Amino acid sequence: MEKLTFDMKLDAKGLACPMPIVRTKKVMKELKAGQVLEVEATDPGSTADMKAWAEGIGHQYLGTLQEQGVLKHYLRKASEEESAERSFAAVCDHSELEQRLKSGEPMVIVDVREPAEFAFGHIPGAVSMPLGELEIRLSELDPQQPTYVICRSGLRSDLAAQALSNAGFQQVINVVPGMKDWNGVTEDIKA
Amino acid sequence: MSIRAISVHEVAQKLIRKEPMFILDVRNTDQFQDWKIEGAGIQHLNVPYFDLLDGVEEILEQLPPEEIVVVCAKEGSSIMVAELLSEQGRRAAYMEGGMKAWSEHLVPLKVGDLRHGGELYQFVRLGKGCLSYMAVSGGEAVVVDATRMIHVYTDFARNLNVNITHVVDTHLHADHISGGRAIAQETGAEYWLPAEDAQDVAFAYEKLGHGTEIKLGSGEVSIKALYSPGHTIGSTSLVIDDQYLFSGDILFIDSIGRPDLAGEAGSWAMDLRETLYKRYRDLAEQLIVLPSHFMIMDELNEDGTVAKKLGELFLENHGLNLEKEAFVTMVSQNLPPQPNAYQDIRNTNMGKMSPDHEAQREMEIGPNRCAVR
């Protein structure tokens, strides 16, 4: 299995409810907005509780992997992105993107979310390039090809679209809204 | 103020006596909505423990001044929340072992005496709505549809000074793990299972079929098998001492069995119809029906038992009073969700899987969901 990257890790193995959430809550305070936490736990009830707790408080619950009896939960700390404003002009919605995908014309989808977010559900064929790595990995992309940029809500992709455009990419489109509202086909790490 | 532990036994007794009880259930909302402690005297509030980590001040005004019983999945979170309530000057208890212990708790109740000598007991598993039985006569006992808490039965038999000589499963269960085989192994009793349900089982058993007769003690009390398919293809009812009808998962007090848990809703619907509307119609109306499940607390009698005359069920049970078309629609469409882990439970009961104790507890979480209404 491919390794998921994260910003901080918490070992809650062997702890019974409520301790996995108590510890997670504490560690979350140390994370910066948008960072990803990996929580290792062995309490089978922790999956449902982690999800319900995170969603109630506004953090993103990304998903859970199971490896040799250990549950690995991935959470992303709530960020301010919901309240920020988009400024990149060229946007398209999901139905437009799906039509473009179907047409078979050459194009690339760049998913600028964190690797753990990407791992638990992305559009098939999308390239994972977290916003923070975009600048140093620009050479992996073809500036002549139509480039669709997507994130969770449309805001990180807005920043990414501006950066790509400034770097001379010819046709950059921000997909709005992002993956949180995507109802089309996805691939994930478990598949 | 210190908190106290309340046992599942005490909760069960209060429930059967319909005493008032305020339960603060601190599991997450999905789990609470799926399955909870229910009863006439019970009031609930559900607030997940993870919303109370910073304190319980915000929910205090929703709580009565009486003792609050805090319940969670295993116990840990309920202790934490009960302590927080206690710090605020409230009387609080936590239920020992949580919902897992609740799911495993059995209440033994005497149903009645057998005409030809002996007694009949019902074991009510309040948490899951499962019913199992022990009939005793002449120093011998038969156990029917046993749960995996086998020591409840073996201890009970020891206290009555009787030997368990026969263990019967009326069908291959999909909602709970059978203790039948384990009891038979421990006591040397014969283990009976309908052959049609046992085609893939990985162990030896006695074939229970139409007309099979099992005798207890000196032989005055007999148990006769009646083939009654529909919930499963092998479902078999038992008539004991011409007085009681063990209906398995075919007929309940306020509902009837569902035919889909082995993936055969369509073809078994007519079997179920035939059993309920023909085979059961040929039986004496005076027989007291003893099902293997209940779904709602209203199905319990005043003394906590679940039992009713067949004749009364013919009059009152909605599922026994439908035209053919409406019947088929009811048992094959709009079915409730299937019980938790039902495929794994079936495989365990067939001897194809041997999950450890903790895994068995997890598999059985939630209600039985064997009925359609």
Image (spheres, coloured by chain):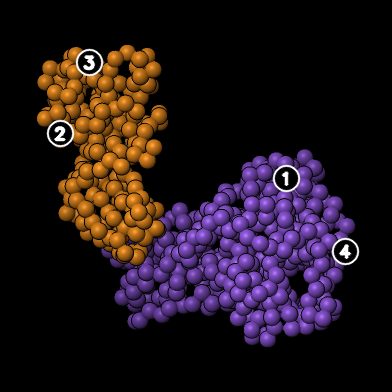
Chain colours: A orange, B purple
Amino acid at the residue labelled 4: Ala
Q: Is residue B87 above or below residue B352?
A: below
Tag 2, which secondary structure? helix
Q: CA distance from mark 3 to mark 4?
A: 81 Å
Question: Are there few (<14), some (14-19), or many (20+) residues within 10 Å of tag 3?
Answer: some
User: Which chain contains the residue that carries disc 1?
Assistant: B
Is B215 positioned to the left or the right of B192 in the image?
right
Name the residue tied to disc 2.
A133
Q: Chain of mark 4?
A: B
Position of residue B223 relative to residue A190, above or below, is below
- Is the residue marked by circle 1 packed among few (<14), some (14-19), or many (20+) residues within 10 Å? many
**Residue matched to label 3:** A145
- Asked which quadrant contains residue B311, the reply is bottom right
Q: Are callouts 1 and 3 both on one chain?
A: no
Residue located 64% across and 76% down the image:
B187
Asked if one can make out residue B195 in the rendered structure from this viewpoint, the answer is yes
Disc 4 marks which residue?
Answer: B284
Q: Residue at x 35, y 81 (%)?
A: B2
Looking at the image, residue B107 sits to the left or right of residue B59; the answer is: right
Residue type at mark 2: give it: Glu
Residue A140 screen position, x and y as percent: 17, 24
Residue A165: x and y in percent read: 15, 20
Q: Are marks 1 and 2 on the same chain?
A: no
Q: How many residues crowd around disc 4 within 10 Å: few (fewer than 14), some, or many (20 or more)? A: some
Pointer 2 indicates a residue of which chain?
A
> What percent of the width, then of the height, locates residue B210?
81, 58
The N terminus of chain B appears in which quarter of the rendering? bottom left
